[in-house]
Each structure stands twice: as structure tokens, then as C-alpha cells.
Amino acid sequence: MGKTPGVKEDGIKNIINIVTERFTIKVKLNETNTAKKLLKILPAYSRVNKWGDEIYFSIPMKAEIEKGVEVVEVGTVAFWPPGNALCIFFGRTPASISDKPQAVSPVTVIGSVIGEESIKNLKEIKDGEEVKVS
């Protein structure tokens, strides 16, 4: 029997969608416990906040930091425990001291945005927009 794209052998999908009014951003999740926990609470609904070239929004999930980092790559998707928030980095933030995105405090990297077009679309998302994660 062949493998189904986007579904791991244990049957859990490792691709999620972050959907706004105008865009669907596909995200490939990694194998962290936080990413696995996220899959169990979907779908989740929230409103976007912008902070420089980062969008973030609270979700109904709590998780401890896993291998916390502050400086990440463009396209990184992370969980920020103090705000119970998903963060998507697409450029410099007010905390950045280089050209790389930097979180305000350590985050758990849970995945990455798929495709350059999606990263460009992130720049168009407005503060306060409704978002669905599924």
C-alpha cells in the first residue's frame, strides 16, 4: 500500500493550513512534541497581531519550551509559550539585531512555511484579520 502525501505512517498529518480571508499559507510541521500537540487541538480560530515582519495569534494550547531559540530563519513557524501563540516570521522584527527574524523571547520551532509565494503573502495580512488553523 502506498503512502498518502502529507500523512505520516502513524496517520497524523504533518501539513497544516493557516487561512485568512485572502490567503492560505501551508506549513510543514516538524516532529516536536509541541507540533504534535497542535495537531490535536485543530481547528483553531484567532485574530492576527503583527509585530514587524511577524504575525502571531493566540491559540487554545499550552506547551513548555522545546529547544528554545530567539533568532530564526524567514518562513519559520513557532510556538511562543508566554502568549500561547503561533508565530510566523517573514522578516525583521523590532527585536532583530541582524537581518534575521528574532522573537521577543525564546520560541519552539514547530515548522516552516511552504513556498516563497506564501512568504510574500504574509506581508499582506493585516493586523486584526481572522485566521483559522486547520
Image: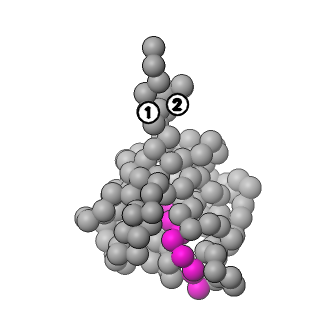
- Judged left or right of residue 44, residue 21 is left
In the image, 24 versus 105, the foreground residue is 24
- Disc 1 element: loop
- Judged left or right of residue 115, residue 112 is right
Q: Is residue 103 magenta?
A: no
Question: Is residue 98 visible to the viewer in this orientation of the structure?
Answer: yes
In the image, 23 versus 50, the foreground residue is 23
The answer to whether 127 is drawn above or below residue 81 in the figure is below
Q: Quadrant of residue 31?
A: top right
Outermost residue on the left side: it is 21
Q: Nearer the viewer, mark 2 or mark 1?
A: 1
**Circle on res. 91:** none
Q: Residues within 10 Å of mark 2 (few under 14, many from 20)?
A: few
**Residue at left offset 52%, top offset 31%:** 8
The percent coordinates of residue 16 (x first, y second) are 43, 47
Residues in magenta? 84-94
The percent coordinates of residue 131 (x first, y second) are 34, 62
The residue under label 2 is: 8
**Residue at left offset 40%, top offset 75%:** 123
Tell me which amino acid carries mark 2.
Lys
The percent coordinates of residue 1 (x first, y second) are 45, 14
Outermost residue on the right side: it is 67
Tell me which amino acid carries mark 1.
Pro
- Disc 2 element: loop
Q: Quadrant of residue 77?
A: bottom right
